[in-house]
Amino acid sequence: MIPRKTLVLVILVVVVLIAGGFGFLLLSAPPAPEIPREIVIGVNLPLTGGSAPIGLTGQETLEIWLEEVRAQGGLLVKAYNRRIPVRTILLDDQSNPAISAQNMERLASEGALVVFGPAGTVFALSAAPAAERLGLPIVTVQTSTAELTRRGFKYVFSAYKHFYQDWPVLFDVVENLIPSDRRPRTFAIVADNTAFGREALVSFVDVAKNRGYGDRIVLKENVTAGQTDFTPSILRLRTLNPDVLVNVIFFHSDVFNFDRQMKTNNYYPRLYVGWTAHSFISYADTLRVDSNYAVVTAVTWHPALPYPGSQEFYRKFVAKYNKEPGKEHGADYAALQIIANAIENARSLTRESIREALSNTKMTTILGPVEFMKEGSSDPGRMIAPDYAIQWMNMKQVLIWPREYATGTLAYPAPSWDRR
Amino acid sequence: MSIARPNFQLIAALILAFVISSAIAYYYVVYVMNNTSLLFAQLVTSGLMLGGIYGLAATGLTIIFGVMKIINLAHGELMMLGGFISLWISTFLRTDPLFVLPISFVVLFVIGVFFQSTLFNSAMRYGLNPPVFLAFAIALALQNLMILAWTADVRIIRSPLIDSTVQVEGVSIQLARFVSFILAIVLILLVKAFIEKTMIGKGLRAISQNREAAALMGINVSIVNVLAYSLGVGLAAIAGTMLGMVFSVSPLDGPVLTSKTIAIIVLGGIGSVAGALVGGLILGLIETYVGYIVGSGFINAVALLTFLLVLILRPSGLFGER
């Protein structure tokens, strides 16, 4: 039998120990994480100079996205379970690759956690090493070159697919939308002599070979960027008369000149596939009815797509700018959705956590389901997303591929100019 | 500023070069590509029409250089500005852009007076380099101002009167190109007559030949500079409008146009008005022949080789003063 006094003493000791233990735990526990007052997102786009058109689409889209985020009171960061306001630092790279890289330093020093941009291949290639060195994640847009993501960067993400992912859609369209007895037999490609154009041409030939069309390419022409007059190339095309002409000229003014001069020289192929300016709304604004029948494969977005937010974005854009958004606006918006998703799901608001969250992206954007290729793959950080094809008809983009989302059928062969 | 004197040896050499290059093009079209001589005719026509537009674009630049001895690095941007102003005025007045050419000429002439009297005249006191840097600064400023005013989008200036293509014996001719070609010849003849027949023109020539002597003879160098620069800028408005009809206008196309027009005036002879047309025609034909025979990727290489060859054999250009 334990004496009563001893029992009371033991109980008191136990109580004191427990209380002391709790007290120690309370005192030694780490302080609750400080919640950041704002999320700083860097924006690095060409807003002036030769590539301003692609940067300005990014800026237009960014404004819509920011309005949405501000209306909600910021982004809902799960790590803190609360909404945190977003502040952006917008820098113009002036269409100068060196400035694009310099902008990364400035954005890093001003506390950006992640960067939207650069837009355009040459600027992204220049800024990527700086992003890697600074440990600042970037989500680039409108960068189709494989070179960007084949260098094994950890902090570089491209919210755009590269040529090797996109070209198969052209052959899907040819093989699925045209009856076998009328199917095109010969192909020609005209690209410019920029890094973009050269990779486009090489990758097209590679993919054509893989799809069994390697010996059907009758002309591979590298024109000079800024050439203005493309009559000689068009007369060569008129002589060789390929069924399909693929135009991968980078600068929009060159594309408009090329297409106008096709009409001047009374030439139009049975299937005309464009890539750059052809997908922009300004293509029809500029060429009007002459834009009809041009086909664009590798379309990233179309307002008719049934994905959440797609039609809402379309409506907001039209209401704000009184013009229709193009696929490039859709791609920019998806890039911002991806950034928002990474911030909201990051373990904390640090660059490393956001990089980690970006690499784990698996979500549905207005482009459809997207994710990035993982480290160890051929193109880490490159987006995987669906591709679509459109054809310009009555100066509107008609979605023709894939069939399940199509809003119209492919008009093939395109009539000659005098029959329109 | 020089007036081309007939140099029969040079003219014979140019005609011979044209005949030989055309014979090569003909052989390639008919015997290598198995096409008809019609396509060859199309090539020659396209080359000449393109050359006419180049000549028109280079005329204003050569006048400015002839008198002021500076390369106007803003020439391309001024052409684009002229194109945009024509587009804007013709849209506002709801009239054909061809009819607003005189208005655009006057608007850019006034802008030229402003630039020259406020900026260039003072910059020129410090030598020949500051005005060139100034022109470069103006080019950058104009490019960004045009983006602000009209966005960076590419625009086509549509003239209902000449926005079509005619077939002549199976050869396609874009009317806008043809009008540009004729306009280039007419304007060059007018400028030539102005320089040769008027007192102001004589003043322009006097200053271009010997600035100090002309000043000692009582010619007001500053005013003549203003006139030369404004005339060159006014002509850029006409060239820019026609370029917009044939090709397109964009605030971003200025640098390419500037470099191309510099190549043309060096080829034709810096300061020579007729040389601008001849240089333009040579470049137009070279680009068209080379583009068809060798491929468009080689156009610039061959054009620059020709440019270097002319510089080596005749550094003052084909019609420039030795």
Image (cartoon, coloured by chain):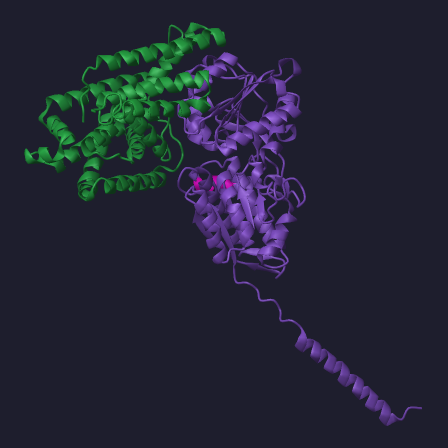
Q: Is residue A361 above or below residue B135?
A: below
The one nearer the camera, B10 or A30, is B10
Q: Which chain is purple?
A: A
Question: Can the viewer see residue A87 in this picture?
Answer: no
The one nearer the camera, A367 or A354, is A354
* Residue A152, magenta (yes or no): no
- Residue at the spot 31% in from the left edge and 21% down from the top edge: B280
| Most frequent secondary structure within the magenta stretch | helix
Q: Is residue A339 above or below residue B150?
A: below
- Residue at the spot 58% in from the left edge and 45% down from the top edge: A157
Left or right of B125 in this view: A282: right
Residue with the most extreme right position: A1
Q: Is residue B72 above or below residue B283?
A: below
Q: What percent of the width, then of the height, locates residue A270?
A: 54, 16
Which residues are the magenta region? A314-321
Question: Can the viewer see residue A195 in this picture?
Answer: yes
Q: What percent of the width, then of the height, locates residue B308?
A: 34, 25
> Residue A32 falls in which quadrant of the image?
bottom right
Q: What percent of the width, then of the height, locates residue A190?
A: 51, 24
- Residue at the spot 40% in from the left edge and 13% down from the top edge: B43
Left or right of B146 in this view: A291: right
Name the image quarter holding the C terminus of chain B. Answer: top left
Name the image quarter holding the N terminus of chain B. Answer: top left
Left or right of B1 in this view: A323: right
The one nearer the camera, A242 or A31, is A242
- Residue at the spot 13% in from the left edge and 32% down from the top edge: B210
* Residue A315, magenta (yes or no): yes
Q: Which chain is green?
A: B
